[in-house]
Amino acid sequence: MPHRDRSRPIGRRQFLRRSAAAGLGASLAALTRALAAPGAEAQEVRRRVTLGRTGLRVPDIGFGSSRLSGEEALVRHALERGITYFDSAESYSDGASEETLGRALAGRRERVVLTSKVECGARHSKAQLMQALEGSLRRLRTDWIDIYFNHAVNDVARLQNPEWREFAELARKQGKIRFTGMSGHGGRLVECVDYCVENDLADVLLVAHNFGQDPAFYQKLTRNLDFVALQPGLPKALARARARGIGVVAMKTLRGARLNDLRAYEGDGATFAQAAFRWVLSGGHADALVVTMKSPEQVDEYLGASGWRDPHEADLGLLRRYEERNAATQCRYGCRACADSCPRGVPIADVLRTRMYDRDYGDPELARREYARLGTGAEACLSCAEPSCACPFGVGIAALTGPTHRRLA
């Protein structure tokens, strides 16, 4: 655990015991004083990990590029701070993400681990997958991709397509990819992870994992032991994967990424994002995490959590306040309890996901693009007189879907 003189880390169990009784104001004040001490060095990567059997050494916090579109200086800033893991996909910013990384990392390829993704459906062919890979290689200006993911998998049928394995073996043999992976954050994630592990379909897993999916977090907010835990089998599934030598990278770690409403409770080095990252990095379920970075200041803030293997005693206060403020408007990753509650077939979880892109991420362009992919989206909600949709977590579905359609359609 680096820099012990600058902070007061505690063990995860001790953290959970103390935080239930600790006062938010006092804890944050102490943390702010500790991490904002005069002479504190610039933020940088402080820990690197080996990503399972790949042998790849990566920073514990990697660069997500889902909204990257021309910001080459931002990529170089991240590289200067020690970030050498860059996560992309052919669909990110309609290819502009990969193009930006390609330009920014020209001449630096040997220093970094590059990933990309493609959605391999149940009927995609080996030729189609190879064509997609060639496009990513061209945009990234490289001869090889270190980890190539089957993107956003939430259906085992997609993993059962033999064309993926044949494509992967050929691409490896040709030196175009080094390792394969599976990414996912849907309601069937555990089922897909288990199938992937049992059939040796991935060297690395990229999965949604955050404090809002951790039963231990909610047990500190309520004494109701019947509280619904999202994907309670995920920790065990990830443990099985890691026991097989499969690397695990966490994404969606910020539980929706709504930050501005917590700034009044933060201080230098004591931010909601850092608390959320510490929760993930101390949980033992993931080797590292990847997060979208949009500015040099955000890179520096996020790296304030690098090197931590334990949470801080002030973290739960920030996470609890975030949950109190946002639980009524944000879907839980992997829940989908509302999937069949609309008789007119509105894809509620997907509609609310696009709302998150718009309102929480602050990216209306991405939100509109993703909303367009839903077809009619939530149009039916505009004329619904008696909503039957329901959320076990109290999200006000009917009050959110209609306005989302008006804004994004």
Image: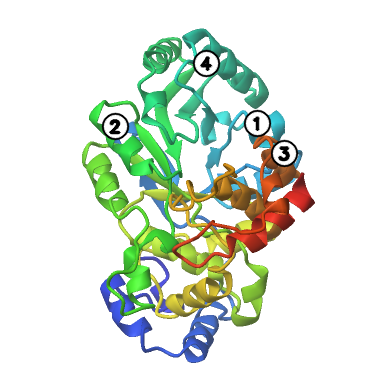
Which residue is label 2 attached to? 195
Q: Residues within 10 Å of mark 4 (few under 14, many from 20)?
A: many
Q: x, y percentage for residue 292?
A: 60, 49
Per the model, the C-alpha gap separating discs 3 and 2 is: 31 Å
Front position among marks 4 and 2:
2
Per the model, the C-alpha gap separating discs 1 and 4 is 17 Å
Tell whether label 3 touches label 1 (CB within 8 Å). Answer: no
Q: Is residue 192 left or right of residue 102?
A: left
Q: Is residue 279 left or right of residue 377?
A: left
Q: In the image, what residue occupies the spot 47% across and 15% down? A: 123
Q: Nearer the viewer, mark 1 or mark 3?
A: 3
Quadrant that contains the N terminus: bottom left
The local secondary structure at tag 3 comes to: helix
Residue type highlighted by circle 4: Leu
Q: Name the residue beneath numbered marker 1.
A: 98
Residue at the (76%, 39%) spot, across then down: 70
Question: Residue at left 71%, top 45%?
Answer: 379
187 to 304, vertically: above or below: above
Q: Position of residue 98 (x, y in %)?
A: 65, 31
Please provide percent x and percent y for residue 207. Answer: 42, 44
Amino acid type of the residue tagged 1 in the rendering: Glu
The alpha-carbon separation of the residues under discs 1 and 3 comes to 18 Å
Q: Which residue is mark 4?
A: 129
Q: Which color scheme is applied?
A: rainbow
Specify which label sits upstream in the sequence, 3 or 4: 4
Along the line of sight, which residue is nearer the eye, 325 or 250? 325
Rendering coords of residue 4 (x, y %): 39, 74
Using the numbered discs, state the Cα–Cα distance from disc 4 to disc 2 in whole angstroms.
21 Å
Which residue is disc 3 drawn over?
369
- Residue 69 vs 382, above or below: the answer is above
